[in-house]
Image (cartoon, rainbow, N blue to C red):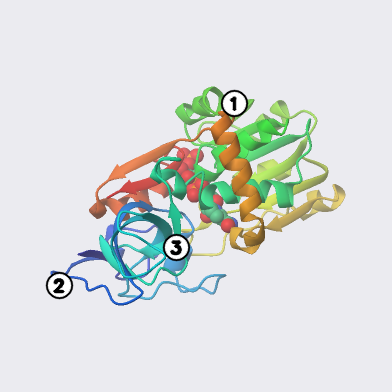
Amino acid sequence: TKTILLNNRPQGKPTVSNFEFVNEDAELKVGEGEILLEAAYVSVDPYLRGRMSDAKSYVPPFELNKPVQSGVVAKVMASKNKNFSEGDYVSGLLSWKTQQISNGEGLLKVDGNKAPLSTYLGVLGMTGLTAYLGLNEIGKPKAGETIVVSGAAGAVGSIVGQIAKILGLRVIGIAGTDEKINMLKSKFGFDAGINYNTSKDINADIKALAPNGVDIYFDNVGGPISDAVLFNINRFARIIICGAISVYNETELPKSVSVQPFLVKNSALMQGFIVSNYAEKFPEAMKHLSGWLAEGKLTYSETIVEGFDNIPNAFIDLFEGKNKGKMIVKI
Ligand code: NDP
């Protein structure tokens, strides 16, 4: 069994030296009520960066010298638990281990015949739920409105934009390369896109693309990109703070730009979003997401990295924008 431990807490951008690989030969024993799992797909997510530091947050930090955990799809190799059979696939929060023992708590059975197994970590997993619930519960979208999505070509952003299109909104995406902007328009049906790395003035670009103002901002990145969007909000705009990847690796508190006047004069709502607060709405969200997928109204991209040993690199690459859509490691 191979395991990846958190060896030390990242200072600034994470590096492979923050992790330690451990190899164990001992055979894993399955006790009464337990199952033996073999990892098939491992999700790497920006939010894990927060758990690698010891700052207080909505989930406890990872402990040093303990395995890192994230969303994993795993195969049941042996079972002494009546709820699971050998050959089943499950999805849940599991350790970065090639094999592990579980009592089955918190695991969901997933069906690779209904949808590719990797999608249970993306569009049919936390990613899809975040996009759907963040947009609907805080954004309260209405047909004809204009939405801006940052981190638009990533896992959550690419789903948010598509749902907004299904609901009849005008959708503008912000992402880091021209290739991503092209993908937003050609594959995901966005109306327009802004490459924040080449734009000379993001504020002016938004003004030009949204002359009537921005009604909803789905924020995945924070920082100056978000300031530029907030300068362009409409009256009664809704701002969903889903993530702030541009500041996750900052070692000092970023200097703030005063966006409050824009919120005040527009009576705008800005609210932080954590997907786990909306668990009672997961079934409803899943029904819509799987329905749209089946009807071909919703699609997705995945960047699949191969090999257990590449999990840390795949995680680090999120901060370089190396992924299009959901970053997943195939074991
Ligand atoms: P993504 O697939 O969007 O991957 C991260 C992307 O962020 C990269 O591809 C990159 O794209 C972009 N990025 C990286 N660094 C920067 C930077 N400095 N400035 C601007 N963009 C940057 O990840 P997810 O879809 O999984 O997550 C998106 C956001 O949503 C994250 O902030 C995450 O923490 C948050 N999230 C929140 C949840 C919640 O419950 N609140 C649940 C799930 C996710 P590019 O090339 O465009 O720069």
Q: CA distance from mark 1 to mark 2?
A: 51 Å
Q: Would you name the residue on which mark 3 appears?
A: 107
| Vertical relation: 32 (above or below) 109 | below
* Label 3 SS: loop
Q: Tell me which residue sits at (44%, 56%) in the image.
A: 109
Which kind of residue does numbered mark 3 sit on?
A: Leu
The answer to which of 325 and 114 lies nearer the viewer is: 114
- Residue drawn at x 23%, y 54% is 309
**Element on which disc 2 rests:** loop
Alpha-carbon distance for marks 1 and 3?
34 Å
User: Mark 2: which amino acid?
Assistant: Ala
- Residue at 31% x, 54% y is 87
Crowd around label 3: few <14 · some 14–19 · many ≥20 (10 Å): some
Residue of label 2: 26
Left or right: where 212 falls relative to 318: right
Residue 320, percent across and down? 40, 45
Residues at discs 1 and 3 in contact (Cβ within 8 Å): no
* Residue 77 to residue 134: above or below: below
Residue 174 found in image quarter: top right
Can residue 195 be seen in this snapshot? Answer: no
- What kind of residue is marked 1? Gly
Name the mark on residue 189.
Answer: 1
Question: Gap in Å between the C-alphas at discs 2 and 3?
Answer: 25 Å
